[in-house]
Amino acid sequence: MIINFSVILFIAFLFVGCAQRVSVDACLDGTPYGFFWGLIHGIIAPFGLIGMLFKDNVTVFATNNNGFWYAFGFLLGSGGWGILAGKSKQ
């Protein structure tokens, strides 16, 4: 079991080592996105994910963000979709 996991981990590191680095300098213009934009982007994330299937220039998470507060807003926004699931009966 441990040997299988080690082999899979080794292969994963080989694939990661071959990955192409994409320059994000063009995405870092202007002011960084904050909490409010993270919240909005989290709410529309499922639609962005569908858009990523058809277009290469669609992303779900903004590259030019201010860090924690953007990620916190994104987490709250994307977690808000759980309200639509309703309460499950056990």
Image (spheres, grey):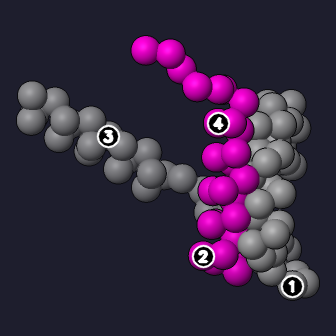
Residue drawn at the location 36% of the way across and 43% of the way down? 12
Where residue 80 sits, quadrant-wise, is: top right
In three-dimensional space, the C-alpha distance between marks 4 and 3, rounded to whole angstroms, equals: 35 Å
Q: Earlier in the sequence, mark 3 or mark 1?
A: 3
Residue on which disc 3 sits: 11
Q: Amino acid at mark 2?
A: Phe
Q: Up-down: is 44 above or below 50? A: below
Foreground mark, 4 or 1?
Answer: 4
Q: Tell me the quarter of the image containing the N terminus.
A: top left
Majority secondary structure of magenta residues: helix
User: Crowding at label 4, few (<14), some or many (≥20) Cα neighbours within 10 Å?
Assistant: few
Q: Which residue is mark 4?
A: 82
Residue 71 versus residue 85 in the image, above or below:
below
Residue 71, picture quadrant: bottom right
Q: Residue at x 72, y 30 (%)?
A: 84
Mark with earlier residue (1, 2): 1
Q: Position of residue 40 (x, y in %)?
A: 83, 57
Q: Residues within 10 Å of mark 3 (few under 14, many from 20)?
A: few
Q: Which mark is residue 31?
A: 1
Q: Is residue 9 above or below residue 28?
A: above
| SS type, badge 3 | helix
Q: Position of residue 55 (x, y in %)?
A: 88, 38
**What segment carries the magenta color?**
64-90
88 displayed left or right of 44: left
